[in-house]
Structure formats: C-alpha cells, structure tokens
Amino acid sequence: MSLLALQRDFGAWLRDGDGDAAAPGMRVYQNNYRASLSACLEDAFAHTRAWIGEEAFARAVVEHICRVPPSSWTLDAYPRDFPDTLAFLYPDDVEVTELAWLELALGEVFVAPDAKTLDRADAVNVDWDNAILHFIPALDLRAVRTNAHALWSALEAERMPPTVELLGGRHAVLVWRHDMVSRFRLIDEREEQALALARSGLSFADLCTAAVAVAGEVDGIALAGRWLGQWLADGLLTADTGMLDALPPIQTR
Amino acid sequence: MPPSPFAGFGLGLRKPHYAEFLGPRVAVDFLEVISENFMVDGGRPRHLLREIRALYPVALHGVSMSLGSAEGLDRAYLARLRALIDEIEPLFVSDHLSWTRIGGFSAHDLLPLPYTREALDIVAANVMQAQDALGRAMLIENPSTYIAFDGDEMAEWEFLDALCARTGCGLLLDVNNVFVCAANHGFDARTWLDHLPAQHVRQIHLAGHSASEHLLIDTHDQPVPPSVWDLYAHILPRLGPVATMIERDDAIPPLHELLAELGTARAIAADAGRLAA
C-alpha cells in the first residue's frame, strides 16, 4: 500500500472507524483526535457550554465532529462552524446560536491583524469634510434577535443570567479589539447601517448626508457626530482615516 | 548543515507562567513555544512573544507542519511560519517525524509513519521544501507512537540518520518518546539511543507520560520520571553541545517545580561533564 493510500485510510478511520473493534494503539489515536477537537470547542465556547449544560454541549460536540471534520492546519479555525451546528440543533433557541457567535467573534478579533488606531488627538488633524473612514480589521458585527450579549456578560461575571428576551426592533452586536482586549456592545439599526455604509468606503461627508436623509438636517448631523465620537472612543478607526481625504484635483488644460 | 549548537537549559512557555517570565529574570537559558499558537495575524499572543523574545532566546516548536504527508506541505502554513521566524529569529525551528493532514483533513495529532523507503523519500522532500521556504535547517523530533507497521523497512534511528544525511536537518531528541515507544513496541531504549546519529542532535525534550491499560501515552502531564532521567544520563556523553528542556503541557505545576526539574537536568549534565552555558 502506498503512503498516500495508507494516510487516506487512516484519516477515514479516525473520522468514522469503530474504536471498540480496533487495536489499543488505534484507539489511542482516535481518542486523541476526538479529545483535541472537544477541548478546542470547550475552550472556545465556555459560556455557551455553561448556558446549555455540559451534557447537551457534549452531544453538540459529538454532532459537530461528525458533521464537520477539521480541515485547517490551525485548531483556531475549528470553532468557526460550531454556531451553525448549534443553529441546526437548537432551531427554536436563537440565543444559543447568538451566544456562540459572540464567543467566536470575541476569539477571532483577539488575534486579528493589528492596526494603529486613530485617537482623539489625531482626529483634530483630519480633514473631515473629505475624509474616508477606515476601520480596524479586528472588527465584526452580526444582527441579533435576543439578549445573548447580556447572557454572556452575566456568565462572564459568574452572575445569574437574565431571562432570554427577544429584542424589540432590529439590533446588532458589534465586536472589536482595542488595547489588546476583545470588546462588544449592542448597537441599533441606524448605527448598524451607518457602519455598513462607512465600511464600504463612504466618505464621512456622505455619511452625514445619509444621516440627514434619515433624521433630518439638524438631528442627522448630530447623529453622525455622535457615531464618529463613539467610534473614535471605541478605537474602531485606523490612522489611515483621512489619508485618502480628498480625491486628486482633476487635471485640466 | 544542521543549525549551530546551543548549550543551555530551558522550559516550554505556557500560559500560567507568562507573567513570571515577563517579570524579573527567570533562571532559564531559553524558552520554547508552540509555533502555531503564535502564527496568528496580531493581537496579544504575537505582542507577548515579541516581549518574551526581547528577554530570552526562543525556540519555535511546531505540531502541524505534517512533514510526513504524502501530499506535500501546506504553502500557506510555511509562509506564516516564515513570517514568524523572520520576526522572532529563533534558536531552532522544529517539528515532528509524523503526519497530521491528508486530503483536506487535518487530524491535529502526530500520526505515525511507516519507516519505508517511500516514506523516507516523501519526508526528505518535504523537509527540503520546508527548509527552502523557511530559509534555515530544521530539527526533526522522534515521535511517541502507539502502533507499528508490518511493512517497516528500517529502524527509526536508520530513518532519522538517512533523513539528516539527505536534508541537512538536525534532530530534536525526545527522550520520553524513546521510552514510551520502547515500552509500547517492545524494544530496548538504550539500544535505540546507542544507534542514534548523535552528531545531529541539537535539542533534547524531557517529559513525563501516563500508563493506560495497554500502552504508555505521551501525555506531558507528569514530572520527568526516573526512567527518563536515566536515559538522559545515558545519552549525554555521546552528544555535543545541546539545548535541554522540560516539556509540560497539562496539569502544569507552579514554575518553581519545573525549575527544580530543570535543576535536575543541570545536575545530570554536570555529572556528565557538560555544564550549562
């Protein structure tokens, strides 16, 4: 048997083989395989595990290992599909999937690329009339329907979690890293849309125009100003902001 | 050519001890980190490693290169490791004589290889590719294994000797792995060590293991046992300058306990006429 064939057979057996019928050494390898994936998911989703309970979490892990064999060289990638497995297993308990996504996102932004953030002192020198906002790469957001973020906070603080509630209106959870620490906050629909626009490359002036269209002349400008102040305080903007501040003048003869 | 020798005594850098290693100088000559834990884009892990590197020499020890994969190596993995090497300038870069990935499946375990001429060709080609991509010679570690293959065409030490001759790599000798394999496969550990091409050894791992019903398991969750210390003392007189370290990955004790174990290693080396750097 070629080495390639041997390794394919070995890999298939690790995934699907009957350990009870195998030699002790093969059982060690299969146990190592499953144990490392279980430990990875337990580590990445500690609060989700606490929320649904150890037995339920263990069943979800078994289901996930069967559904999604690992493919990346890094175990850090393995948790990425676990919220989808939970959504499949808990279709009526949306908070489970949302809590798992929040844990995943906090972990992902923790090791996302570094970027120099724009602080308030830098912001004074930006030509805001022409600036295009650039956001740090360590940022993610997702629309949510429940107070899973409050569950996470309670579990993190080892407090009694609140009752699951459906949020009124559309909301999203914004997750980012600042000063080496992963953070999150709940945002409303208008800020979510503003972030989507700004992250697509809209200039700050155009963002103000969009805010005016939604909230009127006075309130719109104030709203855009509040967003900008909050994003600066959060450390969401990079020092690249303002570098693309103005298109080069059109050359004319 | 294998990497230049470094004589000293070190520990694996693990989370419970981060703060102590960032504080007043700890009595180690180097630290070893698991490469993959720091092959991330940014954030605290990479920042921490830069801080540690400013204080101690660092060796990079990998678990996911899959040098025995019949499908070759993952170029994206090599590129990430090269970037880490360029930033950290490690003492050594090592990985295992094993495989973990095939056909888009990654087992995240150190899986065994048959010691055949075909496997030697494949591992040698992969080591050459890795060394080209990384810009330096690697150290290859003998693994703990729990099965043996009927079709083996050479002993493990012959495989390692041929691999070093073909690729210029060096060896990371894991003494505990020799003990575990000897117990699991029924050979004499001292005989294995006596045949090892000692001139290629640049680093030594010392660790503990656990016993299951049928086999010894390389768990790294125990102190180094007397049997492994005996083998360490046995091999030292055959080695040139070498970097020795204690590996502990589970049930991690307070740092002073690991430093005490490292003291034992220093004492054994001193008895063998091989004082710390």
Image (tube, grey):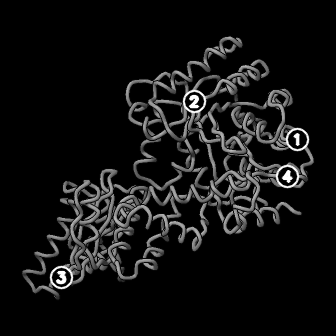
Q: Chain of mark 2?
A: B
Q: Nearer the viewer, residue A180 or B147?
A: B147
Residue A235 appears at what percent x and percent y?
A: 27, 59
Rendered image quadrant of residue B6: top right
Does dot 2 land on a helix, a strand or a loop? loop
Closer-to-camera residue (A6/A124) = A6
Q: Nearer the viewer, mark 3 or mark 1?
A: 1
Residue type at the position of mark 4: Phe
> Which residue lies under the disc numbered 3?
A211
Which is more foreground, mark 2 or mark 1? 2
Q: Which mark is residue B149?
A: 4
Q: Is residue B127 visible in the rendered structure shown here?
A: yes
In three-dimensional space, the C-alpha distance between marks 4 and 2, rounded to whole angstroms, equals 30 Å
| Residue that label 2 marks | B223
User: Residue B107's mark?
Assistant: none
Front residue of B232 and B170: B232
